[in-house]
Image (cartoon, helix red, strand yellow):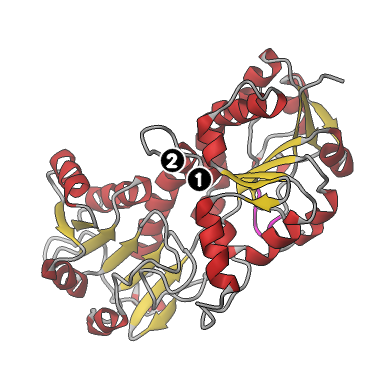
Amino acid sequence: MSSKTISIVKETRFQETRIVLLPHDLGMFIDSGYEIFVETNAGAQIGYFDEEYVNAGASIVSREEAWGYSNYIPKLLCITENELQYLRKDMHLSAFFYAGENYHLIQKMCSSEINAYSYEYFEDDCGRFPMMVADGWISGRLALLNAAFYLQSTFGGSGIVLGGMHQSQQSKVVVIGHGNVGKSAARTALSLGAEVTVAGRSHESLKRFANQHPAMDCVLVSDQEFKQVVLEADIVVGAILISTYDTPAMLTEYMVRKMKRGSVIVDVTCGYGKGYMPTADKITMPGVGPYERHGVLHLKNPRFPAMAPLSAVQNASQLYAPYLLALGEMIFDEAKQDIVSRNGQILKKGAVVHPHVLSDFSKIESRDYENYELSDHLIDVA
């Protein structure tokens, strides 16, 4: 067995059919001397079968073997309760953990003394979060398309077609945030003929965005103009990068009460605590329709990419591969330090080490947020 091994396991969370790496993106690991183990049928649900992984140089093994043969296991999503049994001391596990939403599970992981890395914290020297890009583009597009679908009166929407028709008034979309998710949602809305306003918190970054997208209006969330465009909006998409306990409300309950009846709010980021969209207080899993608050339909979906798994994986795998390889090189050779994945480390030998996670957990443990119903963000089904 090679001194460098990597195991790719099947995702077991509810309604999840994606896989972290596709066969054609394993070449760089093979070239770097890795022995690759893939759990049987790990990619079968999206049409990537075991034979393709074998042809790419991997060995197909059982679930128990996949977890047991390697100390380096990159996943897509945080493990389930049933997968805790596979954790062991000195294992290196990477995934989208969203630790603030998964407090109880992370605490259980600590007892195994593993090392864990969370992709949403992988940050480069320029302050960019490269592992968030692929899912961000899909999330933004699907958020807008789903919101447009639920504008139909059949679902309680206002009964308009996004973009308007020849004799109808042009529809209006507000996007809060202009990162990967926000850009994607805004561009999709514009392509469908809607009038688009993008809101941001930083004057300088919003100015840069406005210069790149002259067809869109841009406002600061702190301005009175922001409140006005929200009240006139048919769709509001929340696309702030991180929504935590401390994130101030931007779309307040008072504003929602004043919005047009049958309009739609979509919270894509789906953070924890009351966040910046306090009326969006309940997760809507894929396949579940919106709920109504003050006459406004709400969607709070953190897993839009799971609704288009084939497109999501085909876009993400080639992006993930070099960062997962860099993490692996650091794991197997301490001299090869990788600042991007090191920035993403949340557990070191079972101890919480990331400052954001430490801050979130301290607030939970001090009961500063006792009115927040603490429960794991992702439904746990193995």
At label 2, counting other C-alpha atoms closer than 10 Å, the crowd grade (few under 14, some 14-19, many 20 or more) is some
Q: Quadrant of residue 310?
A: top right
Q: Which mark is residue 129?
A: 2
Q: Position of residue 3 (x, y in %)?
A: 81, 20
Task: In this rendered view, identify the residue nearer to me: 55 or 240.
Answer: 240
User: The residue under label 2 is which amino acid type?
Assistant: Phe
Q: Report if residue 332 lies within the magenta region.
A: no
Q: Is residue 312 visible?
A: yes
Q: Is residue 193 left or right of residue 5?
A: left
- Identify the mark nearer the N-term, 2 or 1: 1
Q: Position of residue 257 (x, y in %)?
A: 27, 85
Residue bearing the label numbered 1? 121
Task: In this rendered view, identify the residue nearer to me: 43 or 270.
Answer: 270
User: The residue under label 1 is which amino acid type?
Assistant: Tyr
Separation of disc 2 and disc 1 at Cα? Answer: 7 Å
Q: Is residue 287 visible?
A: no
Asked if the residues shown at circle 2 and circle 1 are in contact, with their CB atoms under 8 angstroms apart, the answer is: yes
Residue stretch rendered in magenta on the structure: 13-17
Task: In this rendered view, identify the residue nearer to me: 251 or 57.
Answer: 251
Q: Is residue 357 left or right of residue 13?
A: left
Q: Position of residue 178 (x, y in %)?
A: 29, 50
Q: Is residue 173 left or right of residue 44?
A: left
Q: Residue at x 59, y 74 (%)?
A: 374
The total of numbered circles placed on residues is 2
Q: Quadrant of residue 75?
A: top right
Q: Is residue 136 left or right of residue 105?
A: left
Please, what is the dominant secondary structure of the magenta stretch? loop
Q: Quadrant of residue 107?
A: bottom right
Please tell me whether residue 362 is drawn above or below residue 188 in the rendered image: below
